[in-house]
């Protein structure tokens, strides 16, 4: 009996790109020029409430220990935050779409522009890694009640002139701050907070997170994990719609306010009232705010996972 022998060939990149484009074409939605220009203007106005004050301070060498954080700790430049992206699945129509010819990650054809989904394998691996981290965090319950003690652990037994914000005194002084750390259970799960602990404080933490174990420890109750949703949102750009990036930025901004209000520093000179986590009332206030941030962060995390899945679906 004759047997037919079938062989398979790995599709060429050109064939893969063509297939991807065909699938993407069928799902894409078209925005007329008036609609997307309005969205772009609204986004710029929205983020300018944060960008312009920061640029004003930076131009005059005025540092703000709370409000500068999202611009100095994270790598997304103010100009990049202001730049509007429609996100994956939308096509921009009209002559102004040609503005995107100079923007990386776009395909511009005539009077239309869209995000280019034919990305390199290294970029797809990055997106898959982000999806795994976000999904792993979403599957865990929120661990609440850390009371922002990571900020206290960063100054534990540290000389006053060596702390992160030496221009601002510690509310309880060095000895009082150390006593708060020693009388509480440190439960920080976020490596990028834990790595700034002083050496004596690290051994007091119930877990020892590392960069390699980040996905194993990340959980939705962590304030810094919630702030990092902004990092993942802009890292996914231009696949992420700028409205989602701005949603993550604004949540991170609010979280940063609580983070520093609950810290050991005295920011009263900036008009900032502390959340006194060393008291029962302060703990209750912190816990309530933390719960609300965790719930809002979970919604944004789900939307970011959806972006990752949408990009992966084009491969």
Image (tube, helix red, strand yellow):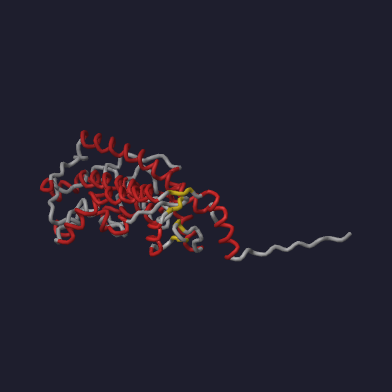
The quarter in which the N terminus is drawn is bottom right
From the viewer's side, name the closer residue of 22 and 132.
22
**Numbered-mark total:** 0
From the viewer's side, name the closer residue of 264 and 247.
247
Q: Position of residue 50 (x, y in %)?
A: 23, 51
Q: Could you tell me which residue is drawn at 36 percent across and 53 percent down?
A: 208
From the viewer's side, name the closer residue of 107 and 54.
107
The quarter in which the C terminus is drawn is bottom right
Q: Position of residue 23 (x, y in %)?
A: 56, 53
Taking the image as shown, residue 19 lies to the left or right of residue 161, namely right
Q: Could you tell me which residue is drawn at 70 percent across and 62 percent down?
A: 8
Q: Position of residue 101 (x, y in %)?
A: 41, 63
- Vertical placement of 234 versus 273: above or below? below
Taking the image as shown, residue 129 lies to the left or right of residue 74, namely right
Q: Where on the picture, by quarter, is residue 84?
A: bottom left
From the viewer's side, name the closer residue of 50 and 129.
50
Residue 205 visible? The answer is no
Q: Position of residue 116 (x, y in %)?
A: 47, 59
Q: Where on the picture, by quarter, is residue 74?
A: bottom left
Q: Which residue is most to the left?
A: 269
Residue 65 visible? The answer is yes
């Amino acid at each position: 009996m004759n047997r037919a022998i079938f062989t398979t060939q790995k599709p060429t990149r050109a064939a893969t790109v063509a297939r991807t484009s065909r699938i993407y074409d069928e799902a894409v939605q078209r925005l007329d020029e008036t609609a997307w220009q309005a969205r772009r203007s609204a986004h710029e106005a929205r983020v300018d409430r944060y960008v312009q004050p920061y640029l004003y301070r930076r131009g005059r060498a005025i540092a703000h220990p709370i409000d500068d954080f999202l611009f100095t700790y994270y790598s997304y430049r103010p100009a990049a935050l202001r730049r509007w992206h429609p996100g994956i699945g939308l096509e921009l129509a009209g002559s102004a779409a040609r503005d995107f010819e100079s923007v990386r990650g776009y395909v511009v054809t005539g009077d239309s522009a869209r995000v280019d989904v034919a990305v390199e394998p290294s970029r797809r691996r990055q997106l898959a890694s982000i999806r795994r981290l976000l999904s792993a965090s979403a599957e865990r319950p929120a661990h609440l009640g850390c009371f922002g003690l990571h900020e206290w652990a960063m100054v534990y037994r540290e000389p006053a002139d060596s702390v992160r914000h030496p221009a601002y005194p510690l509310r309880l002084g060095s000895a009082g701050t150390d006593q708060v750390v020693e009388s509480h259970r440190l439960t920080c799960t976020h490596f990028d907070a834990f790595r700034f602990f002083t050496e004596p404080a690290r051994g007091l933490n119930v877990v020892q997170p590392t960069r390699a174990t980040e996905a194993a420890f990340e959980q939705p109750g962590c304030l810094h994990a919630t702030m990092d949703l902004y990092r993942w949102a802009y890292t996914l750009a231009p696949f992420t719609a700028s409205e989602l990036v701005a949603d993550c930025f604004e949540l991170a901004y609010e979280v940063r306010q609580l983070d520093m209000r609950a810290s050991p520093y005295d920011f009263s000179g900036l008009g900032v009232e502390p959340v006194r986590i060393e008291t029962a009332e302060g703990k209750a206030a912190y816990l309530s705010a933390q719960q609300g941030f965790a719930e809002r962060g979970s919604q944004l995390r789900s939307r970011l996972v959806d972006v990752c899945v949408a990009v992966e679906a084009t491969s």
